[in-house]
Structure formats: structure tokens, C-alpha cells
Image (cartoon, rainbow, N blue to C red):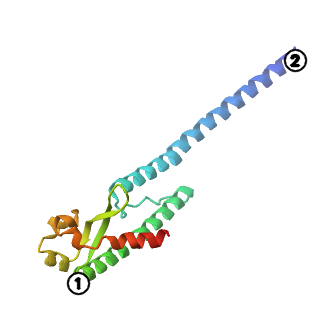
């Protein structure tokens, strides 16, 4: 009889220990959900917003002293560097655009148009400088995105030079 009571007491004790352990495990999971998962979801939302808006000035909150806060600091530092790089690229682009736009010689950025046999037949004007537009006596809006054959006689333009250079490059 004493043995059965002891066995029953040990069983109740083990069950109570298991229930208490499950309770603390549940509390730990709730804590992890509130603290870790919510922080990660906030970070994901900010990343999505930056991706959609291309706004490199957005920042993550860096509160806390955990790995997620350190990740936020690193992410914000990366955004700072991307912003600086983007600014440098804009400055460089504006500098070279100004230089090319104000050249006295005609300049155009073109794409070669090929026929079905791969032979160059025309040029598509992607960009040009002020001297080019003055020379052809048309505005930028009327030229960009159109073929050069719309403005000039293609036979007078030596498109075959591209055929020769292509043959040299391939052969």
C-alpha cells in the first residue's frame, strides 16, 4: 500500500513538473513571438517599403541590445553607404551629362538596328547633345527614341562600317 501511494505521488509529481515545464515553454514561445518575430516582421516591412519606394533614407529602429538590433544597425549602415554611392553616381552622371550636352561637336548615343540577316540597316537614337539637335534642326523630344532614317538619308550614312568592324571582331 505504501509503495502504491509513493508510486502515485511520484506520478503526480512528474505530471506537475511536465505541466509546469509546458507552461514555461508556452510563455517562452509567447515571449519569442512578441519580441523576436515581431521585430523581424517590422524589419521585413521596412525592407519592402524601401524596395517599393526606392527611398534610401528610411531606417530601422535600433533599440535593444540583441542580435536583431545589431542587424538593424548593420542594415542602416548599408543604407547609408548605398545612399552615398547613389549621390556620387548622380553627381557623376550630371557632370558628364553637362559636359556632353555642352560640347560643340555632335554627339549621339545610338542603338544599331539590324535586319533579319543580322546586317545593320539603321540607328535608333537613344540620346544626343545640344549640338546634334541644332545640326538636325529638331528638338530632343522629336528625336529621342526614333530611327535616324526618319531624319536623314540612310544611304549617306556609312552603316557598313559596322559590318566591317563586326567581321574583324568575329573573325
Q: Earlier in the sequence, mark 1 or mark 2?
A: 2
Closer to the camera: disc 1 or disc 2? Answer: 1
Is 125 or 127 nearer to us in this picture?
125
Query: Residue 132 occupies which quadrant of the picture?
Result: bottom left
Q: CB atoms at circles 1 and 2 under 8 Å apart? A: no
Outermost top residue: 1
- Whole-angstrom CA distance, mark 1 to mark 2, is 109 Å
Helix, strand, or loop for circle 2?
Answer: helix
Residue 52 is left or right of residue 38, and the answer is: left
Is 119 or 101 nearer to us in this picture?
119
Quadrant location of the N terminus in the rendered image = top right
Q: Is residue 86 visible?
A: no
Instruction: Write the residue at 36% across / 71% down.
Output: 162
Query: Residue 92 occupies which quadrant of the picture?
Result: bottom left
Q: Residues within 10 Å of mark 2 (few under 14, many from 20)?
A: few
Instruction: Write the residue at 26% across / 80% down.
Output: 100
Residue 23 is left or right of residue 86, and the answer is: right
Q: Residues within 10 Å of mark 1 (few under 14, many from 20)?
A: few
Q: Is residue 105 visible?
A: yes
Q: Please, is residue 118 above or below residue 154 in the view? A: above
Residue 16 is left or right of residue 156, and the answer is: right
Query: Residue 21 occupies which quadrant of the picture?
Result: top right
Q: Please, is residue 26 above or below residue 131 in the view? A: above
Residue 15 percent coordinates (x, y): 72, 26
Helix, strand, or loop for circle 1?
Answer: loop
> Residue tagged by mark 2?
2
Residue 123 percent coordinates (x, y): 27, 66
Instruction: Write the residue at 88% across / 18% down.
Output: 3
Outermost bottom residue: 104
Query: Any mark on residue 105, and which?
Result: 1
Residue 96 percent coordinates (x, y): 30, 79
Query: How many numbered marks are there?
Result: 2
Amino acid at each position: 500500500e505504501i509503495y502504491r501511494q509513493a508510486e502515485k505521488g511520484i506520478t503526480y509529481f512528474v505530471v506537475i513538473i511536465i505541466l509546469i515545464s509546458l507552461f514555461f515553454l508556452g510563455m517562452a514561445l509567447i515571449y519569442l513571438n512578441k519580441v523576436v518575430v515581431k521585430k523581424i516582421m517590422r524589419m521585413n516591412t521596412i525592407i519592402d517599403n524601401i524596395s517599393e519606394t526606392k527611398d534610401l533614407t528610411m531606417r530601422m529602429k535600433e533599440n535593444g541590445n540583441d542580435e536583431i538590433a545589431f542587424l538593424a544597425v548593420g542594415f542602416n549602415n548599408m543604407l547609408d553607404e548605398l545612399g552615398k554611392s547613389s549621390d556620387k553616381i548622380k553627381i557623376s552622371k550630371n557632370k558628364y551629362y553637362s559636359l556632353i550636352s555642352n560640347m560643340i561637336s555632335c554627339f549621339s548615343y545610338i542603338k544599331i538596328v539590324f535586319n533579319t540577316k543580322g546586317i545593320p540597316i539603321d540607328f535608333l537614337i537613344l540620346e544626343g547633345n545640344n549640338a546634334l539637335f541644332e545640326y538636325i534642326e529638331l528638338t530632343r523630344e522629336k528625336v529621342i527614341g526614333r530611327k535616324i532614317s526618319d531624319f536623314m538619308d540612310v544611304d549617306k550614312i556609312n552603316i557598313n562600317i559596322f559590318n566591317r568592324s563586326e567581321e574583324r571582331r568575329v573573325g
